Amino acid sequence: MSPEELGIPGPVAVIGSGLIGTSVALSLRRVGVDVLLSDTDPQSLDVAVAAGAGRAIGPDDQPSVVVVAVPPRHTGQVLAEASSRWPAATLTDVTSVKQTVLDEAVALGADPHRLVGGHPMAGREVSGAAAALANLMDDRLWVITPLPESGVEHVRRVHRVASACGAVPVEMGMAEHDAAVALVSHTPQVLASALAGQLRESSPDSVGIAGQGLRDMTRIAASNVDLWTDILAANSAPVAEILDRLAASLGRAADSLRAVAAGSTESVAGIESLLSAGVEGQRLIPGKHGAAPSAYREILVQVADRPGELGRLFTAAAEADVNLEDVRIEHVLGRPSGLVGLFVRPDAGERLIGALQERSFDVRG
Amino acid sequence: MSPEELGIPGPVAVIGSGLIGTSVALSLRRVGVDVLLSDTDPQSLDVAVAAGAGRAIGPDDQPSVVVVAVPPRHTGQVLAEASSRWPAATLTDVTSVKQTVLDEAVALGADPHRLVGGHPMAGREVSGAAAALANLMDDRLWVITPLPESGVEHVRRVHRVASACGAVPVEMGMAEHDAAVALVSHTPQVLASALAGQLRESSPDSVGIAGQGLRDMTRIAASNVDLWTDILAANSAPVAEILDRLAASLGRAADSLRAVAAGSTESVAGIESLLSAGVEGQRLIPGKHGAAPSAYREILVQVADRPGELGRLFTAAAEADVNLEDVRIEHVLGRPSGLVGLFVRPDAGERLIGALQERSFDVRG
């Protein structure tokens, strides 16, 4: 598709050559868009240019769209500067917080008519231009948050940029977006960090008996501290509100448990209702392709830990013409085998079990 | 191996034909041990017997070891009854909480010399005798918690039962075990439930933008409410203590965030230190086979969602003679493709990437 067919009437400037900026630039280059790059760090800019993400922006370049991809605390300032430097350009950003960042941009002089917020829901555990990928945005949601003043044509252009990057654009209000990410992303990050932090005071033996549950619940605690400090600071009010509710809920659970320890049998109800609410809430999370997670059946297989075994397993599934919806692998300390969970549509379960048993796999049910 | 070679001098009674009891029984039958079964529900007992888990215990049977596998709130009582009914037998249990349960057993008359606590670290999301598996305990840690009064020979017998079931016995103190599971298992359960519970009050659009982080952090919230109410009640004091610390930590984070929202830049330090503590704590969790999780490199591959693609991927890894240490699959709403993360030893990373690219896989780095 040519840039004209994409509906983007001229070059796109990407300000900031970090992971997200360079990935956006690479994905736009992939569909033939003329991409102009800029970064305060000449080395990052060089890496991005060398990777084929575009060319360094010159004084006479006139981008039709400017994508600001700098850390949240600089985004408002950079949007305001871009607004005055390119008075006709559509302005957007990629920060994971919208209200405070866009408010700041407007307060600093950005033209609200041309400003449209954006948040591609993509990332990696590593950062920097060198980690950028042309397909990082593929199939990802890209939330677009227009301001009340945003012009329709500018909103449309940001949609087109998101689509050109391979992402799926979704429009939301700024406050709605910030409350949503506070709940589904920012608060879980704080929770994971707080839980993982508790492990520092325990013995290695204790941590040694940890199962998959603890691993799942602390994985994101390994994230970049500077970036997340920035994100949480920018979305501080909505996150604080949810953290307060959670702290109160944990405090009530602790009170119920202490009452149980002291012999109160009726206090068990408090624990029960917290757990039941969790079961209900968990069901609301969409699974793959929006299907409910419970729509799949899990088949467990014990697999020897040597090259080829997983290949043999998945080839067997393919030969039985069974599509695997999801896979999880569970390992056990000290023994060379793993338990593999294969998620399939319920009607394919028996066919898969039969095919695996025929090939002498140790199917556990 | 014969029962004599296993060092178990006579039949093993398993009281309770639920998931764990029946699985223990099946795994003992697998190595030729004579297993005697009992359950207050005749239907569960029938299912276990029909599955080949053993025979119904008779009035004249004299087990050498009794494994009590009933819900935590009945375990003390059943251990005490077993102690008086079979005055020479070694007594053990499989509950996930040790101090309160074993204290209760002794208070009700169980002989502490013959009593040795146990906790096999295995389970499934489903329950009941019909869900039992002969290899559920294979390669799992089985924590053994002797009482101060436990006789050496009785401790040794419980070790042998655990090994005969295919598990890896590990000895710990009762309080140490309870504090450890409070931290690595029971508190994470409460946390996951509390977080998932918050989702009930949000809009479907908000939950719709949830990524892998929220999914990981709420997966265990789907667990069985009755069983977990029981477990938490039995380990109430240690769990309450950690929940209080966590609630305080979340409250402090909320305070810092509110101060940041009000313009205090120095309050950012509070957020930063919480996140840094999380990074440190997360590193303490052992990975597969006790290796540090960071010991592996993750290679990301975009894979089409159709039968055979995963097989082709894993076969390619095997042909390159690369052992996959772990695998994770990430799905994206609305598009038929998945991102597969392959974890390999760092020295195998480049070889795997080369092999995958040669076979036209979309390697993302």
Image (cartoon, coloured by chain):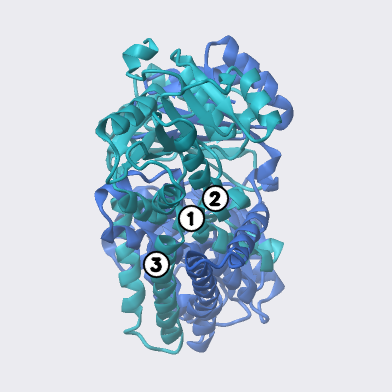
Chain colours: A cyan, B blue
Three-letter residue code for mark 1 = Ala
Element type at mark 2: helix
- Residue tagged by mark 2? A73
Q: Left of B294 or right of it: where is A154?
A: left
Element type at mark 3: helix
Question: Are discs 1 and 2 located on one and the same chain?
Answer: yes
From this viewpoint, is residue B358 visible? Answer: yes
Measuring from the top left, give residue A172's x and y in whole percent.
Answer: 29, 44
Q: Which mark is residue A241?
A: 3
Three-letter residue code for mark 3 = Glu
- Residue at image x 50%, y 81%? B105
Measuring from the top left, give residue A58's x and y in whole percent.
Answer: 58, 21
Place residue A199 in its image quadrant. bottom right
- How far apart marks 1 and 2 lie (CA) works out to 7 Å
User: Label 3 is found on which chain of the structure?
Assistant: A
Cβ atoms at labels 3 and 1 below 8 Å apart: no
Name the foreground residue: A173 vs A169: A173
- How far apart marks 3 and 1 lie (CA) works out to 14 Å
Cβ atoms at labels 2 and 3 below 8 Å apart: no
